[in-house]
Image (cartoon, rainbow, N blue to C red):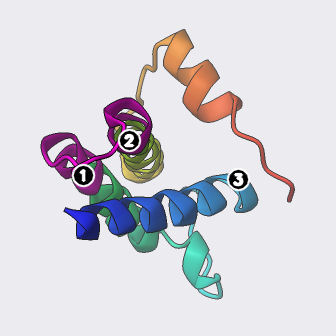
Amino acid sequence: MLQFYFLSVLLNVISGLVLVFTPPLSKSEPKTQPFFETNHFRLVLGILAAFTGVMKLLSVVQYDIPVVGDLLPAIAGVLGGFCMLFEYYTCTTTIDVKVNTFFETVFIRGRKCCC
């Protein structure tokens, strides 16, 4: 279905821009914060990106190259959604979270921010 393809591309672009150009979430959220830097925006965007990525794995665009046209956007959506959900969880949890060093390197310290 082409709707999932366009939704996948749109959410991948938005989540990529949010992950690259916004600072990481902090535990204390100030009251005057831009919309793209709020916890709730990233939670909703992460859920939508991950769901669209899973649905993209299940639906295939006809007459398209399956790996390039279907698999790469689906994996990008699932990973982008996972990054945002993981960041939201580590920011909002009250329990001290022990993170594997691989996940910490890739998803927390490997993030590029130009702020």
Q: Label 1 belongs to which residue? A: 61
Q: Which quadrant of the view contains residue 108?
A: top right
Question: What residue is disc 2 on?
Answer: 82
- State the residue lying farthest toward the top: 101
Residue 20 visible: yes
As for residue 64 lying within the magenta part, the answer is yes
Cα distance in 3D space between marks 3 and 2: 15 Å
Residue contact at pointers 1 and 2, CB within 8 angstroms: no
Residue position marked by numbered label 3 in the rendering: 20
Residue 112, by quadrant, is: top right
Amino acid identity at mark 1: Val
Q: Is residue 61 left or right of residue 92?
A: left
Residue situated in front as seen by the camera: 36 or 78: 78
Q: Relative to residue 7, is residue 94 depicted above or below?
A: above
The disc label shown at residue 33, or none: none
Q: Earlier in the sequence, mark 3 or mark 2?
A: 3
Residue 43 visible, this angle: no
Q: CA distance from mark 1 to mark 3?
A: 29 Å
Range drawn in magenta: 52-72
Q: Are marks 3 and 2 in contact (CB under 8 Å)?
A: no
Residue at the spot x=35%, y=56% of the render?
49
Residue placed furthest toward the bottom: 32
SS for tag 1? loop
Image spot of residue 7 (x, y percent): 35, 68
Q: Is residue 14 left or right of residue 46?
A: right
Looking at the image, which residue is at 15% across and 49% down? 59
Whether residue 26 is situated above or below residue 73 in the rendered picture: below
| Amino acid at pointer 3 | Val
